[in-house]
Image (cartoon, helix red, strand yellow):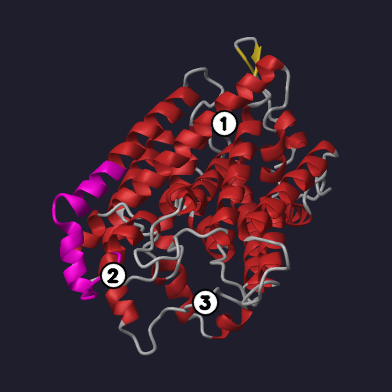
Amino acid sequence: MTSRNAAASSRTVAGRSVPGRLHGIDAARGLALLGMMATHLLPTFESNADLTPTWIGLTFSGRAAALFAVLAGVGLALSTGKQNPLDGSDLSAARRGVALRALVIAAVGLTLGGLEVSVAIILVHYAALFLCVLPFLGMRLKPLLGWAAGWILASPVLAFLLRPWLLAANPPLRLGHNPSWEDLSTPTRPLADLFFTGYYPVFQWLSYLLVGLVVGRLMLNKRLVPWVLLIGGTFVAFLAKALGTAAMESWGGRAALEKLLDSPGYPLHSVLQVNLTGIPQEGSWWWLASAAPHSATPLDLLHTSAVAAAVIGAFLLLGRLAEWVALDLLLPLRGAGAMTLTLYSVHVWVVSGFYLKPLPAGWTEEAMYFAQAASAAVVGIVFVLLKWRGPLEWLGHAANQVGRGGVKDIR
């Protein structure tokens, strides 16, 4: 979303202008982008026998990607009627537009999937989420709340029951790599990987888009709503993480899972803090009691959704502060957040150039990250000040306009 769109979407409520609201949404998306880049470029574990988590792993792992997905739901809500969802032919047109935009994102993701890179690329999963959320776009707030809560609770249980059956297939229905165009020749494996056995399981991650739709359906221009998101999200996030930690450390969960893994000395306590991807979560219901990042359990989904809500609330408040002081405090982040598809794709392409290769002389992982983060911020600022869309954003917008039955605003 460009600054032009954000400005056009401003409203006056009770005589008060609120033009900065969408700036906060874009800025939160920019933070999600930089957080995902950090987990790609900087170590999330120390290189010791205990795999001690780094602050990057403890802060961003699982949370940055979840924020990205929740914001996708917020964007869909804002584009399909905010508090009053579209219906009838308008809703059908909106769904066609979202579907075509999803196909553009999927095409970009499948193309990037052909690169050799140590990054779990989210774009094909992101596109699948857009398609899966289509039936929910016409729902109002209360039904969405019910669906979001139910999906957070039920989808991990169903996935837990189905995953062993999928992995027991010969060969296992798991790609072990980013989906690419070649995988379309055997659709069963990429579909199973996308929805259940991969890095971003769409079946459970639909929870994030439903939560995003709920947030987007709220009256975000009301004075108290950002505070509710910030304070309520912080409380729920803390509670979910505390319950998960207690289940693992105080109630016997980690001890039971360590016996199940039968790997003496394996630092499960560290993995539970940073990333559970790659560990087969089967054989014990204790797996569903953790709040580990990338475990897609009820507590993980609840914790990361709540963190996303709190971040969105904080940035909405910063947007209001920026209006009050008449200074665009969010510009460095909102510029990048307005063109995340382009910047994320360029980031993955750059990272692929160093796959299994040493960094250039004099460069460190930290320097590589800050160079890419600064470049993303500068490019975003330039594009937003010039009121340009990113190249891939333009393509996605064009597809959306075609789906809606018009091409007047393709520019």
Q: Residue furthest bottom?
A: 170
Q: Which of 235/59 is in front? A: 59
Kind of residue at disc 3: His
Helix or strand or loop: what does disc 2 sit on? loop
- Residue where numbered disc 2 is placed: 266
Q: Which callout, 2 or 3, points to the residue nearer the camera?
A: 2
Q: Residue at x 52, y 45 (%)?
A: 73
In the rendered image, residue 58, in percent from the top left (x then y), is placed at 42, 50
Q: Nearer the viewer, residue 308 or 364?
A: 364
Mark pair 2, 3: CA separation: 24 Å
Of pointers 1 and 2, the one earlier in the residue sequence: 2
Check if residue 246 falls in the magenta segment. Answer: yes
Amino acid residing under circle 2: Tyr
Q: Which residue is mark 1?
A: 315
Is residue 385 visible in the rendered structure shown here?
A: yes
Q: Residue at x 68, y 19 (%)?
A: 323
- Left or right, 207 with respect to 262, comes to right
Closer to us: 248 or 47 = 47
Q: Answer with mark 2 or mark 3, whichever residue precedes in sequence.
A: 3
**Disc 1 residue crowd, few under 14, some 14–19, many 20+, Cα 10 Å:** many
Q: Is residue 218 above or below residue 275?
A: above
Query: Is residue 186 rendered to the left or right of residue 101?
Result: left
Against 73, residue 217 (above or below) is above
- Report the span colored magenta: 241-267
Element marked by disc 3: loop
Residue marked by disc 3:
177
Q: Is residue 134 above or below residue 139?
A: below
Q: Are marks 3 and 1 in contact (CB under 8 Å)?
A: no
Mark 2: give few (<14), some (14-19) or many (20+) Cα within 10 Å: some
Decide whether residue 331 is among the magenta residues.
Answer: no
